[in-house]
Amino acid sequence: MPDSDWLQGALRKAIAAFLGFMLGFVLLVALLLTGFYLLVNAAALALTPSLGGAGALAVTGLSCLLLLFLFFYRMTRPLPSKPSEGSDDQSSGTPIGAVKRLIQKNPLEAALAAFALGLVEQGDPRMKSLLMQGGMALAKEAERQQGNDAGEGEVSKAANDAADS
């Protein structure tokens, strides 16, 4: 056992937090199971006058099995693939393509993250040059895409070639 009082206190707090979490989790599970049990009993009691005792239990049991089957079916089926809009198939599987799609879907959050990163890493010249290179590459690509969309294909190609050289 460590001799430090602070370390012992922190260890006691961590153990108490873990035990409290586990106790709360067990209580929540017990309440959910009890509630489900009472709900099934109420359904069986409500169906007893019209279907009889055995029929009511059979209907509630089959409905519980159906819900259980639907739950496990939903959990085990594969996720549907979402076609990405406006991105080619080559960049869709790469991490860079995923980051590009994330930035396109969340531009405000991306700008805030870039601003925070710029403030934090302002003193590091390597990070600054890397960010500038990446930003310039993304800006050139965005200009190319806008030029192609607006019908200015040849003019923007000439401007980009002049800017690259």
Image (cartoon, rainbow, N blue to C red):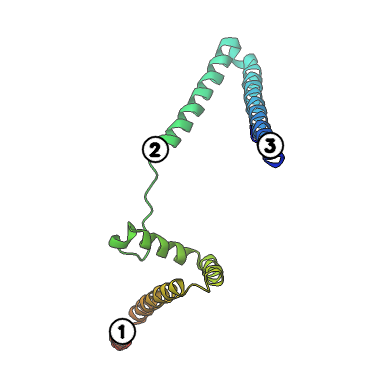
Q: CA distance from mark 2 to mark 1?
A: 48 Å
Disc 2 is placed on an element classified as loop
Residue 8 image label:
3
Q: Position of residue 117 (x, y in %)?
A: 53, 68
Residue type for callout 2: Arg
Task: Find disc 1 in the rendering and name its residue.
Answer: 164
Which quadrant of the rendered structure holds the C terminus?
bottom left
Q: Nearer the viewer, residue 54 or 136?
A: 136
Residue 102, position as x, y percentages in the image? 45, 62
At horizontal 63% and vertical 21% (from top left) the residue drawn is: 37
Asked if residue 144 is positioned above or below residue 60 in the image, the reply reads below
Q: CA distance from mark 1 to mark 3?
A: 62 Å
Mark 3: few/some/many CA within 10 Å (<14, 14-19, 20+): few
Identify the disc placed on residue 77.
2
Vertical comparison of 74 with 165: above or below = above
Q: Going 41% across and 65% down the picture, which residue do you hit?
A: 100
- How far apart are the two marked residues, 2 and 3, measured between alpha carbons? 47 Å
Q: Quadrant of residue 86?
A: bottom left
